[in-house]
Amino acid sequence: MSNFTIDFFELSFLAEACIPPRPIARAFFWNNLTDVYWKQMTENERARLFSWMNRNDWYLVSLTKEEDTKKFHARFNPDNQYLVKTEYEGKSEEHRAFLYEDSYCIDNRKSIAKEYIKEVTKFNPKID
């Protein structure tokens, strides 16, 4: 499958059109915002998209009801970013994570098991 490049504003408009609850194709894109596109964005773009969405009334309503919206919100919230150091089978790693319902998550489906967490540090993204 081919990849296509869209600019930040097109991505933001598309995100607004996919605020949960939506049909499966839109829901798939919405989850990719958290799992795939978040990694491709700069800190500034993440903060701008977070701010953009929080100005949308439908987003604010969805945030009170929809699990996927709550996870998106937690992932993109600049004040909810952490560096989590883990150790598993003698191997140490550091992960960029977000806090969601008492768990440090890496994406929509992956959280870090508490028994492997060695240190958690609040991460303050540099936003222009």
Image (cartoon, helix red, strand yellow):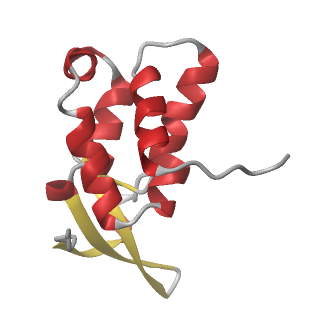
Q: Where residue 88 sits in the image (x, y, percent)?
A: 48, 77
Q: In the displayed image of the protein, which residue is found farthest to the right? A: 1
In front: 69, or 46?
46
Say whether residue 57 is left or right of residue 17: left
Q: Which residue is drawn at 28% across and 63% down?
A: 44
Q: Does 24 sit above or below residue 4? A: above
Left or right? Give the position of 27 relative to 121. Answer: right
Q: How many marks?
A: 0
Looking at the picture, how far across and down is residue 39, in whole percent? 48, 61
Q: Which quadrant of the structure image shows residue 15?
A: top left
Residue 56, given in percent of the width and then of the height, sits at 23, 24
Q: Would you say residue 108 is visible in this rendering?
A: no
Instruction: Residue at 35%, 39% (x, y): give it.
Output: 72
Is residue 4 toward the left or the right of residue 119 in the image? right
From the viewer's side, name the closer residue of 35 and 94.
Answer: 35
Left or right: residue 104 compared with residue 8 = left
Residue 27's place in the image compared with 23, above or below, is below
Along the line of sight, which residue is nearer the eye, 17 or 62? 17
In the rendered image, the vertical position of residue 125 relative to residue 99, given as above or below = below
Can residue 5 be seen?
Answer: yes
Q: Give how far across and how far down residue 99 sits, in percent.
A: 24, 51
- Residue at the spot 38% in from the left edge and 66% down from the top edge: 42
- Image quadrant assignment for residue 128: bottom left
Q: Residue at x 39, y 72 (%)?
A: 95
